[in-house]
Amino acid sequence: MRWPQKPTITVEDVLRVCTPWLEKQGWDEAMHGRLPELVGQQRRYRTAGEEGGLLTLLVSEFGGQCKDEDKDRLTATYAKALVGGGGRKLYDALKAAAIYGCTICGVAKPETIDHHAPKDVFPLLALTPLNLVPACGPCNQGKSKSFSTDPAKEPFHPYFDDLGTDRWLFAEIRRADGGAVAEFSVRPPAAWPEIKAQRLAHHFTRNKLAPKYQYESSRRLATRRRKDTNTHENKGPESLRAALTEDADSCAVVDPNDWETALLYALADCDWYINGGMKDI
Ligand SMILES: [Zn+2]
């Protein structure tokens, strides 16, 4: 999973580009009156995120923010002025930073922005760029709009969490009718704290990543067939294993936990495949 850097855009920038729309609503004075508080929220969010205390901060605000008198104005400003109005350039810039794809699945193009802390529960963070993370449509829609206080279910935050460079995504090749499929699973590194391992497991199942990666890998298995058959026939199984490992190593340099990295290592480890099984796919 390769994640974008923290955005340099601030909540002050967001409010500035939304001002013409706020003026039309007659809300500009009220919203600008809230700016110091929104800036304070932004500062606390950043500090908590950097210190690994974001969930604790959100739990302390849980239940309070959703009663805020400006909740509807804040969420409408997000939808009408930032997404659908004069702030669109900032919205697009946040999405464009995710050059390695959706920050949840790492597969699809990030066409939307997800509120890490849901805006209906935390409206004072509805316009905070640090709370706005690029995601593909299905991952965004699939993510719960409610908020869990369970630390094991805390979603990963692409701007603050670090999933390291050790491998934790693995695949296994399973022969199936008419060919083979890759089955994906996660195995957290032994050095990870228990809670981080639980969050990874939740991330993997909650976002239905196994079937998503299996679908992508089925197409890749089909497109590798010709090349891998040629290597097997012309150079032998161990040369094919070496070629697959080399391709896997190249992918791992970019992302050790990309589905393609896991697939290629799984193929290199699969005796059935390197001994000619690819011809049956
Ligand atoms: Zn996605």
Image (cartoon, grey):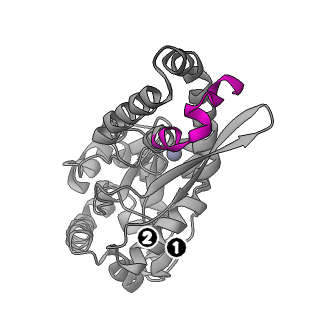
**Image position, residue 45 (x, y; %):** 27, 70
Mark 2 in CB contact with mark 1 (< 8 angstroms): yes
Q: Earlier in the sequence, mark 2 or mark 1?
A: 2
| Residue at 35% in and 47% down | 256
**Residue topped by disc 1:** 147
Q: Quadrant of the C terminus?
A: top right
Is residue 225 rendered to the left or right of residue 281? left
Quadrant of the rendered image containing residue 38: bottom left
Helix, strand or loop at mark 2? loop
**Image position, residue 65 (x, y; %):** 43, 77
* Near-viewer residue (11 or 55): 55
Q: Is residue 199 above or below residue 114?
A: below
Count neighbours of disc 2 (C-alpha within 10 A) and say few if under 14, some if 14 to 19, many if 20 or more. Answer: many
**Residue topped by disc 2:** 122
| Residue at 26% in and 60% down | 32
Is residue 191 rendered to the left or right of residue 73? left
Highlighted magenta segment, given as a residue range? 265-281
> In the rendered structure, does residue 273 fall within the stretch colored magenta?
yes
Quadrant of the rendered image containing residue 73: bottom left
Please state which of the two labelled residues, at mark 2 or mark 1, is closer to the viewer: 1
Q: Is residue 273 visible?
A: yes
Amino acid tagged 1: Phe
Question: Which residue of the protein is positioned furthest toward the right in this rendering?
Answer: 177
Is residue 203 rendered to the left or right of residue 46? right
Amino acid tagged 2: Phe
**Image position, residue 220 (x, y; %):** 56, 28
Q: Is residue 148 above or below residue 87?
A: below
| Residue at 30% in and 39% down | 254
